[in-house]
Amino acid sequence: MKLAKRVTTMLAAVAVAVTLPVAAVSTASASPVPSCDVSADVYGVEQDGRLFVYPHNEPENGGFSWGAKRYIGTGWNAGTVVAGPYGLFYLILPTTGEIRAYSWNGYGWDTAPNGAQYIVVSLPGDDYRYWTQAGNTNKVSSDANGDLWLIDGAGELYYVTDAPSAAAKSATAGKAKAKPEAHSKTRVKVTKDGLQSKAGAQSKAAAAPIWLGVDYIVSAGNGVLYTRHSTTNELKRSEFDLVNGTTTALQTPVGSGWNIFTHLTSVGGDTLYGTTNLGFWEYHYDSATGLWANNGSGKLVGAGWNSLARVLGNPAACYS
């Protein structure tokens, strides 16, 4: 896959932007941009299992500018790949249902204490094979803390964390300062009113499943989730306060027509990327105003990403 250095006038002219609600694009002033690293790492898994990293320069501006593309691994078609912050990767195996964590340091893969290049972070007895099956691989995403969010076949949302409770997380906003270490992870059910433990007494009544019909989930900040709903092709935004265990926003509609995207990912800060056969697009949502930057039109930042098996981003590269 090769990204062109310049966008042709013809490609820009035929580009189809996502249709957003009128209320989301009517604004007299520009929506603020997020704060980001100098570049945001975007990863691609090719059909043959090769993994590459491609840094997108100045992601807050949505420019067509990229650093050097590097291949950093092979065999990543062996299961469902999820990218965490700053080189943390997860591989969910379809044979055992276990989650393996790998750490890319920018030059090579770290060696785990057991001598392998990975550690198993799923707890004994936990089976994640559902998220390796066709149609389910996009129902899992990593956040800036290196924890996982996923939706199961019953329409339940789970938070998979290395902390005994979500309240142990240090902050609900801001940038992750360093790559988290991978540890054994506990699956926690998320309810309408916040988070509750997988086991033991539950202080809040569980809500009826409201995540049925979601075919894509993207974490775009600490506790911030975007979900695409297959029956309506809507994009909805939810936000959970991980410290207090409360819900700030729940499935707020923020766009329609998102079925045009083959892949969706984020680099944090409510910044989304999507692939179509016409290009690679970047969007930024401002939760304070309920508005999309660039009047709701995606910015064309690349080409050739649509044919990949998987497109992923460093979820901690930007923050609002």
Image (spheres, helix red, strand yellow):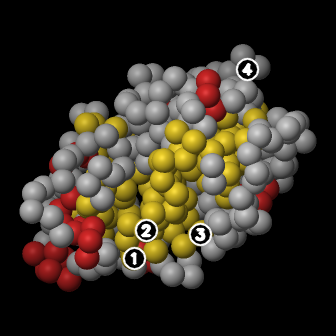
Q: Residue at x 45, y 63 (%)?
A: 252
Rounded to the nearest angstrom, the CA distance separating label 3 from label 1 is 14 Å
Pointers 2 and 4 in contact (C-beta within 8 Å): no
Three-letter amino acid code at the position of disc 4: Gly
Pointers 3 and 1 in contact (C-beta within 8 Å): no
| Sequence-first tag of 4 and 1 | 4
* Residue 115 numbered mark, or none: 4
**Element under disc 3:** strand
Which residue in the structure is indicated by mark 2? 253
Which residue in the structure is indicated by mark 1? 256
Three-letter amino acid code at the position of disc 3: Asp
Between disc 2 and disc 1, the foreground one is 2
Which residue in the structure is indicated by mark 3? 215
Rounded to the nearest angstrom, the CA distance separating label 2 from label 4 is 47 Å
Between disc 4 and disc 1, the foreground one is 1
Query: Position of 298 compared to 223: left or right?
Result: left
